[in-house]
Image (cartoon, coloured by chain):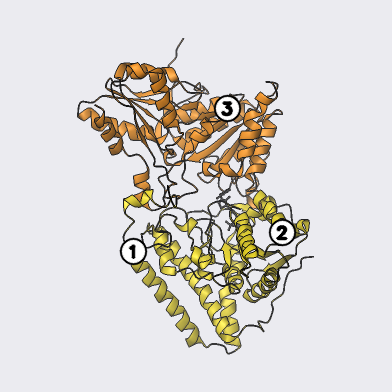
Chain colours: A orange, B yellow
Amino acid sequence: MVTATATRQLTYGQAVTEALRIAMREDPTVILMGEDIAGGAMVDHLVNDDAWGGPMGVTKGLVQEFGRDRVLDTPITEAGFIGAAVGAAATGLRPVAELMFVDFFGCCMDQIFDQGAKLRYMFGGKARCPVVIRTQIGAGVSAAGQHSGCHYSVFTHMPGIKAVIPSTPADAKGLLLSAIRDDDLVMFFENKVLYGMKGEVPEGDEGIPFGVADIKRDGDDVTVVAISRMVTQSLLAAEQLAAEGIEVEVIDPRTLSPLDEETILTSVAKTHRLVVVDEDNPRCSAATDIAALVADKGFDFLDAPIKLVTAPHTPVPFSPPLEAAYVPSPERIAETVRQIM
Amino acid sequence: MSSPSTAIEPAALDREQLLTMYERMVEIRTFEDLAGKNFAAGLVPGFVHLYAGEEAVAVGVCAHLTDRDYITSTHRGHGHCIAKGVDIPGMVAELMGKSTGVCKGKGGSMHIADVEKGMLGANGIVGGGIPLACGAALTAKTLGTGGVAVCFFGDGASNQGTFHEGLNLAAIWKLPVVFVCENNGYAESTPVGYHCAASDIANRASAYEIPGVVVDGFDLFAVHETAAEAIGRARRGDGPTLIEAKTYRYYGHFQGDMITYRTEEELNRYRQRDPIVAVKGYLLAHGLADEAGIDAIDARVTEKLDAAWVAAKAAAFPAVEETLTDVYVTY
Ligand SMILES: Cc1ncc(C[n+]2csc(CCOP(=O)(O)OP(=O)(O)O)c2C)c(N)n1
Ligand SMILES: [Mg+2]
């Protein structure tokens, strides 16, 4: 039986907070850890209050309800606390650790990749690692070379890691709930530019399953697979193109690992054209992976070459006009679609 | 093992050196105040972390360095740049992302660098500069340049693995490097008393059997003296030192920080001992400068900084094609 779920407007950031609150209420083994996720630890007037609630305020208000034993400020020691989250996950907790910016993965990659991601396999399936690592991605705020990357492709590449990338407030809530309840290591990528984005978000505690893409717009003429903020950019492009009589189908995979191959292939079988839009760097990337999938399993559907619209093979520049050129724009997406029509 | 230094009479410093150091400190303070103002006015994109309050550390240490010496810095790097002699108009332009910036606008506040000046970059990664400084010291040692490396980092950074790995490497290889921990009491909103197990970060030196010294980071002369000894030791080939300068930042962690984790009284207690006012007081009391002389320095700095902002505002943004350059030397 399907019942209509009530919804209300929340921002993407608020949706993340809500999912954390629900998960912490339903399961006392869920703990949060990260730098300044409450903030003001051991400051007299902030014993049960937060100074920051994370740099973007996403974990604000949680320490008041759950206390400092479950909302743990950490020193700046990513290898230490992310590794501890992995170890705690393997032994009975469900930690949600915050890696402030994904670019910092270099500081803790061994603990993620060599420890957490491989543990179950190497132990012959006799262990599990239900940890979530939430992290910020994306260019667009002039945060420059070490705070602006996407890098989800790196994690998608690695066996043992699930890579989850919401593009809307509703997806952020539903996917984070599933991530926390999931028994594997999940990397959860929040786009910093989307935190203020508003959208209808369901009440209740329902998760969104992994490996199920969402068709954000129906169309018959061309399939655009877009990730994270590129969904919004592609929907804007689709509007421009609709005015020209080109109907774009916009697909958001939502999880890159696992990947919903079927939804993508079914769409390309209908439209016969594929453009992949990805803000990550272009080599060995989510975009090339999806292109390869369709080239491999959907070649006969295609009436035109597969096109990729991505960031260039460079770090993210600081200067605003350069950064604007770095991120795929609706104009670039629309132009690429026109080329294959 | 480590004992707080007390204010030291700057016997080894002549009038010219003192006035130069005073001017550098004023340059840093003025640079930061203007960066804050122009950030608020929307002219500086991205993240900006201001160094005001900590001037005595960068200036007292870098006074001993020349262009053959290297420094590594942090996200709070403007003061280190100025103290190391990086071009101020080029820094201002960099903050605005202009093509005339020291990094052509590609790095911004968090990545200001000038390798020619021995400034190996501010750093967006906390603790990221510490091993780099060991590398610069290794170069100096291997090539026999006589240079040293000085590594600036915060209290928060002293919890990173890179700090412990870097100190150990420097100790076993007797590298000519000086680690300068700027303990300003906080890492973002987290007090050092929570995030750090050591009561003095300098104590951590003992684990690597190198000297660890605490110094009052608000006292230019104490910093200068302590740095002289550590840098001298490094230059002589006697190995690394860890200096912990107890200091304080006047602004929030970054521009936009609501600063709910500390009190106005705490800030005012530090402001009352302002390191620049203290140096000025010393200069006046010892007849090394008069009010008019000090005012002339202050005015010169203001004029220089104002001109830098005018020039940066008028400068062009980089051409969009610049997005694709500078990734590799050859490709
Ligand atoms: C590896 C890494 N982790 C976290 C951050 C986010 N961050 C930037 S500055 C900072 C606090 C640094 O504190 P401290 O080392 O004491 O330097 P201060 O800001 O006080 O000068 C944090 C957590 C970062 N930039 N890099
Ligand atoms: Mg600090």
Picture residue at 55% right of the left edge, 84% below the top: B16
Identified by mark 3, the residue type is Pro
CA gap, disc 2 and disc 3: 39 Å
Q: Residue furthest top?
A: A1
CA gap, disc 2 and disc 1: 47 Å
| Chain letter of the residue beneath label 1 in the structure image | B
CA gap, disc 3 and disc 1: 49 Å
Q: Toward the viewer: B129 or A288?
A: A288
Identified by mark 1, the residue type is Lys
Which corner quadrant of the image does residue B157 belong to?
Answer: bottom right
Looking at the image, is mark 3 or mark 1 nearer the viewer? 3
**Is mark 3 in CB contact (under 8 Å) with mark 1?**
no
Q: Which residue position is annotated with label 2? A: B173
Picture residue at 44% right of the left edge, 20% below the top: A261
Q: Secondary structure at mark 2?
A: loop
Residue B301 placement, left or right of B76: left
Query: Visible in this render: residue A82?
Result: yes
Q: Position of residue B218 (x, y in %)?
A: 62, 70
Picture residue at 46% right of the left edge, 78% below the top: B298
> Do marks 3 and 1 share a subunit?
no
Instruction: Locate the C terminus of chain A by quadrant.
Output: top left
Q: Which residue position is annotated with label 1? A: B313
Q: Which residue position is annotated with label 3? A: A159
Query: Visible in this render: residue B273?
Result: no
Identified by mark 2, the residue type is Trp
Q: Position of residue B316 (x, y in %)?
A: 31, 60
Q: Secondary structure at mark 3?
A: loop
